[in-house]
Image (spheres, helix red, strand yellow):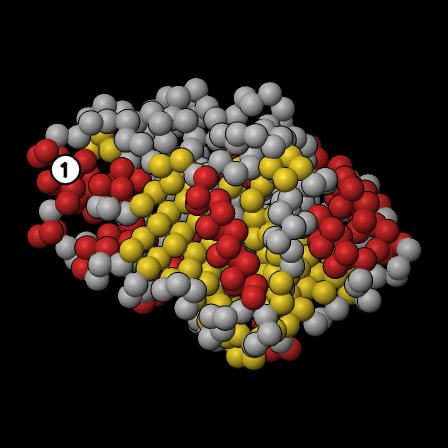
Amino acid sequence: MHCSRHFLLLLLIAALPFPLEGNSHCFDHQIGKYHANSEFVSKTCSQSCTVMPFFSPDNALEAHLNLFEEAQESITIVNPTFESWDPTCSHNHNQCTKCCTGCDISYYRTGEGFPVFAALLNAINLRNVSIRILTNNYSSTTWPEKATMLDWLAVNNISVRMYKTTYFLHAKYAFIDGGKKTLISSVNYSKTSFMKNRESGVIISQCSDCETLKLYQTVFESDWEIADPYVFDNQYTDDQLKSMRDPAFYPYPIVKPPGERVPDIQTTMALQDFNDVQISGYVAPDNARKTFMGSLQNIQSKLIVHIYAITSAKICKEIVDLKNTNGINVTLLVSWNTAGAVKKYTEHCYRNLTNNGITIRKSSHSFLFSHQKYWIIDDKEVHLSTGNWAESDFPIGKEWPPSKAANRDMLVIMQNPSLVKFYGDVFEHDFKLGNDIPGGQ
């Protein structure tokens, strides 16, 4: 009853500007009202950290593989989806109607194309690394005599659970070896997200006692405790299970896809560390709305935003007020391509922004989606989020019943002049490749 849903639908969910009532969505398994946790408030590290930024399609895959191959004790992963890189294995025509997913068991033995899948199997089978995965349950069935990627991982003693704390798990997060290194990003576990989109993320290290990182871990453990165990649709035979667990097959080949780089947009970035970074962060839904809006209202002179979509009318109005009332210089770069009904709400917001003299461009068509989510305030700090500027990612209120769109997301704030400049340079590179949105359009 669990499958990776089509990536376009994930984008749509992530940017919805309104709650979808009536428990009609296959991913919503929330039971009972979720109350904002008074302990899940913004936390600041008392020590500086090392931060390594990464981007899709440049080096996000490399960053993930390096992290998981380094793990010696444990890997914890939170991601909305786990998609095979063979589209026929994850494709779900009817999405929420329980129509099917999965590939032949032999396919996974001959080489699933998703390198992270291979890295996880090697970690548990060759290094005895303990692995936990928290993801969404999309209520779809697996074809008889076939298997999903999550089936393979679970058969190999990787612990998989299905999120049900709130409406939707939208966070993209991982940590290894009890918090030695922590990853936060916009990257869904799909081929599109790694290879065709602009995405952004960071790996934080050298500060395992950081209060911010402990907050993320505490939130994860809370969600993990109430999550549903993963359940197989198919009853595999002893021979099939033996094949899926065959130790002679390891190390599983990690095939890094060659030559799939998006033309004309790479900044040819090498992975690099930035030391002495001051870190703070918070989580959604909980107290995220108040923290986020407060950060906007404290801007002194300049706001740069590079984000997939702005669908919240209230947040859009706040941007206009920043410019017209506070005299803030605002520049935005948004995705040229959005999924489904998202466009209806983004276009209304963007028209309002341009009519008020705010500079906004749409990203290069070389990206399938510009799905990154970061913003720079006063050239002093970078905010990086797993969520968009949507009501579902920053929901109003202190409690959310089932079917009320309230996503689980994570946000990190980073202060370091060199790191801020690095993000500013990436923004300028992508901004120059974009296209203006004319006023009144």
- Residue 123 in picture, x, y percent from top left: 25, 58
The residue closer to the viewer here, 375 or 67, is: 67
Count up the numbered dots: 1
**Residue 342 in the image, given as x and y percentages of width and height:** 63, 35
Mark 1, residues whose alpha carbon is within 10 Å: few (<14), some, or many (≥20)? some
> In this view of the protein, can residue 187 be seen by the observer?
no
Q: Tell me if residue 30 comes above or below residue 358 in the rendering.
A: above
**Residue at the image point whose x is 91% and y is 55% from the top:** 325
Q: Is residue 135 visible?
A: yes
Residue 114 is left or right of residue 266, and the answer is: left
The residue singled out by tag 1 in the image is: 241
Identify the image quadrant of the N terminus: top left
Secondary structure beneath label 1:
helix
- The quarter holding residue 67 reads bottom left
Left or right, residue 263 beside residue 253: right
Which of the pair 260/11 is nearer the observer? 11
Q: Amino acid at mark 1?
A: Leu
Foreground of the two, 317 or 29: 29
Q: Estimate the x, y position of residue 346 in percent, counting from the top left.
A: 69, 39
